[in-house]
Image (tube, rainbow, N blue to C red):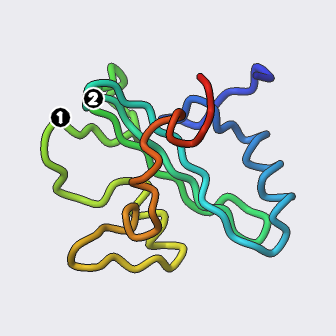
Amino acid sequence: MSGDRTFEGFEYLSPKIARAIARGLGDGSALYVETFYHGGTGGQGAALLEDGELIWTKAESTYKSENPNSIVAYRPFGPRLMKSPISEGLARLGVVASSEHDEFDSVGLGNFRSLENLGLDY
């Protein structure tokens, strides 16, 4: 890592990385996602980039922040009441949920819940 400070709620996404992704997209759109879970606890973040700019970010965690000004949404372990950052980002890209599947599963991301399922060794 370059030592660049990351956006709150993200392990890897920094302004420098967001600028590089946005430059590579040109006039396109992309959703950057990060997840970290173990045994059902953890968190996720999503960032929407459009037309060369970072336009939206959202992160949540089952770990309560010590910082009272944190923008990372705290979500206690258990059922989800609102859209996850990834599903909300996918909706912003135009993915439509069905009555059976949220946006995440509608695009098949449920098939890739681990690095091993992606064919990557961690």
Residue 25, by quadrant, is bottom right
Q: Is residue 111 left or right of residue 8?
A: left
Residue 37, by quadrant, is top left
User: Which residue position holds label 2?
Assistant: 41
**Which quadrant is home to the N terminus?**
top right
Residue 67 x, y percent position in the rendering: 37, 24
Q: Residue at x 27, y 37 (%)?
A: 74
Label 2 sits on a secondary structure element that is strand
Most distant residue in the left direction: 78
Instruction: Give whichever of 118, 94 is nearer the camera.
Output: 118
- Give the residue type that dot 2 points to: Thr
Q: Is residue 84 left or right of residue 51?
A: left
Q: Is the residue under label 1 in contact with that under label 2 (CB below 8 Å)?
A: yes
- Give the residue type that dot 1 points to: Phe
Instruction: Give whichever of 118, 80 is nearer the camera.
Output: 118
Label 1 sits on a secondary structure element that is loop
Q: Earlier in the sequence, mark 2 or mark 1?
A: 2
Residue 88 x, y percent position in the rendering: 40, 64
User: Which residue position holds label 1?
Assistant: 77
Q: Give the numbered dot on residue 3.
A: none
Q: Residue at x 53, y 34 (%)?
A: 115
Q: Residue at x 78, y 58 (%)?
A: 22
For residue 85, above or below residue 5: below
| Mark 2 surroundings within 10 Å by alpha-carbon count, few (fewer than 14), some (14 through 19), many (20 or more) | some
Q: Residue at x 45, y 56 (%)?
A: 109
